[in-house]
Amino acid sequence: MDSDEIRAVAAGLDLDDLADFVQSLPDTLIDETLAGMEQQERHRLEQVLSYDEESAGGLMNLDAVTVRADVSLDVVLRYLRLRGDLPPHTDHLIVVDRHDRYCGVLSLRSLLTHPAEQPVAAVMDIDYEPINVKLSDAEVVRRFEDRNLVSAPVVDDHHRLLGRITVDDVFDVMREDAEQAVMSMAGLDQDDDIFSPVVKSSRKRAVWLGVNLLTAFLASWVIGQFEGALDQVVALAILMPVVASMGGIAGSQTLTLVIRGQALGQVSRTNTPWLLRKEIMVGLLNGLLWAVVVAAVAWLWFGDPQIPLVIAAATVINLLAAATAGVVIPMILRSLGVDPALAGGVILTTVTDVVGFVAFLGLATLYLID
Amino acid sequence: MDSDEIRAVAAGLDLDDLADFVQSLPDTLIDETLAGMEQQERHRLEQVLSYDEESAGGLMNLDAVTVRADVSLDVVLRYLRLRGDLPPHTDHLIVVDRHDRYCGVLSLRSLLTHPAEQPVAAVMDIDYEPINVKLSDAEVVRRFEDRNLVSAPVVDDHHRLLGRITVDDVFDVMREDAEQAVMSMAGLDQDDDIFSPVVKSSRKRAVWLGVNLLTAFLASWVIGQFEGALDQVVALAILMPVVASMGGIAGSQTLTLVIRGQALGQVSRTNTPWLLRKEIMVGLLNGLLWAVVVAAVAWLWFGDPQIPLVIAAATVINLLAAATAGVVIPMILRSLGVDPALAGGVILTTVTDVVGFVAFLGLATLYLID
């Protein structure tokens, strides 16, 4: 695309979407595009571009319709008729003073249902809390959800009105967040899609495979420490993936719940000890239950009465480790500022693989091998 | 809760949320609750309860404000002032004929910006498509997203107006869907949360662990078929998890992309062959790349020049199988009406475990064992 084509695309976009679009262009094209715009439009766009894309400022639009508190509803009605149109998703007009400071909102609902001779001040909602321009987009989404908003005014630290955010932009953020949660668990980034070219896809996914290879070799190295046991009892090699796999699944369940609890604000420092105890109890119950099943199958399969005892003990140990890792790993990652959805899974399965192999092969070395 | 308490809770809810709430109660309590309500309210609630919870009917509210096409805007304005209030998220009034058939919408925007003497018919939007009461909630969400709606009228097959859906309910569906996507990948159901009691949590998660145990034993059985090779070359037991693990990760990447593509409507029968070829190419490139690394490490570790060749070949084979399974499994599950996000992962890793072990241990049996 050259800058003319970009301007043609840009002409059809809302200012906030335009800002997102422009930010995705190479720097030289941004300059060219800005240079070709009308001065007023350019000034407005530059203003939106100056905010972090993932803040309220990056989401806002500058098309708020404002009124003063001291006029009557009748004047507002005549003003709107004169104006001839309202921006999409206008569910209220924003009341400001003459310094452009936010005073409240006048919902179209109130405007339409109150006597026209009343002043705006008498019917406006002064408790409608505006959004600070620096609020994170995740917080903006939460506020729209909690309060069922259609639009909300955006203000700076001095309560000066800067613009407004509408529900359609909040939709976009929700959709992206939801996708990112799923994609990042597979080590994919959000721009990956099924239409990306082969080489680009391969390169992006190779990184994650490389990280996994490191952890896989770590597990192999652990197994290698028990070469003697494996050499003597081939059943150990056959059964060892079962212990590791049960730990991986149980750990992922805990991890997923804790990550979700973090996102919903349900998990905090104060209830972590309680949560850890609870998950360890769940791990113990499921560990005991499935240890019996695993031991029974191993006994039927190999006849030997000692292998079942060893694999049962290793299963319980690994499920307890999985529960602990599922709670502790996302806590640590979060306090380090790393997204637990991205790195949590790979670290967790490394822990459950290592603990699973050490417990199973270690106990076997102690009790089965002469 | 007894039915009095339930009615107290119910009094604070919108009709659609109330319907959701009532559906979560035991049958005897539903009857008691309905019996204690005023007749009109009960009739309205029963009407909403009669629709599938996951359809437009289950999402709708009955608080639509309707007007006739032949009155003037001025009459509408006076009617609203007389009415005294509008339901939340009213961005338009719904225009119906005298048989309550849907004719179009009159946006508050148009109502406020057109001359008051014009008739509703002259300014109403007749292209605003209503939602059929039987439409799935997923389709409702998509339509709200695509068209940036705040509310939409709901009609029956004869275009009779039944109610309306508002953006806050669409938010709830989106949030639930997003959570379900993440939770179901770990075999958790949506009601699972960190505050569930230990026994309830254990029981719910045990099922998924049991499913996984079956697949783990299948993998063990496959390994057991190569007991002879494992008995002779202990390095095979040490290295075999690497091949299975690389396949599992690569397959999950493809699976996640395809499931997302399905959700976005990007994957269809027509582009499946193309997608399969592309993913196989990605699998081949990454397979070759990491096969070299894996082989180099195996060579440094065990000295033997044949093990590296076998593990490299097995890695490439498993990554090709992973790419194929990642595309084919969600396609098949979807055509069977099973949610690929729920069952896809466990089936995929079963495939990559089995193929990984068979390829690695099988090739070793052919080329390494006398």
Image (tube, coloured by chain):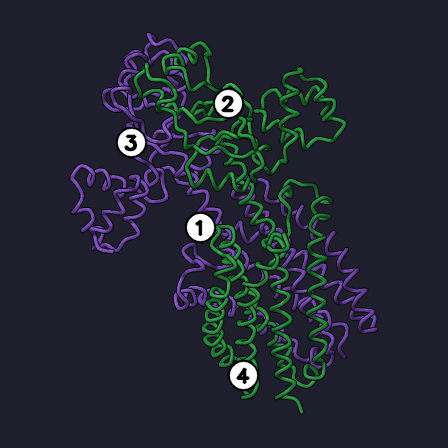
Chain colours: A purple, B green
The residue positioned 60% from the left and 72% from the top of the image is B241
Q: Is residue B224 left or right of residue A38?
A: right
| Image location (x, y in percent) of residue B72 | 37, 15
| Image location (x, y in percent) of residue B278 | 46, 67
Dot 1: what SS? loop
Looking at the picture, does residue A123 appear above or below residue B57? above
Q: Residues within 10 Å of mark 1 (few under 14, many from 20)?
A: few
**Residue type, label 1:** Gly
Separation of marks 3 and 2 at Cα, in angstroms = 28 Å
Looking at the picture, does residue B227 appear above or below residue A114? below
Separation of marks 3 and 1 at Cα, in angstroms = 35 Å
Q: Chain of mark 1?
A: A
Which label sits in the foreground, 1 or 4?
A: 4
| Image location (x, y in percent) of residue A296 | 81, 64
Q: Chain of mark 2?
A: B
Which label sits in the foreground, 2 or 4?
A: 2
Using the rendered image, report if marks 1 and 4 lie on a common chain: no
Looking at the picture, does residue B35 appear above or below residue A258? above
- In the picture, which quadrant includes the C terminus of chain A? bottom right
**Residue type, label 2:** Ala
Label number found at residue A337: 1
**Residue type, label 3:** Asp
The residue positioned 57% from the left and 83% from the top of the image is B310
Sequence-first disc among 3 and 1: 3
Which label sits in the foreground, 3 or 1?
A: 3
Label number found at residue B308: 4
Dot 4: what SS? helix
Question: Would you identify the image quadrant in which residue A75 lies?
Answer: top left
Can residue A267 be seen in the rendering of this structure? Answer: yes
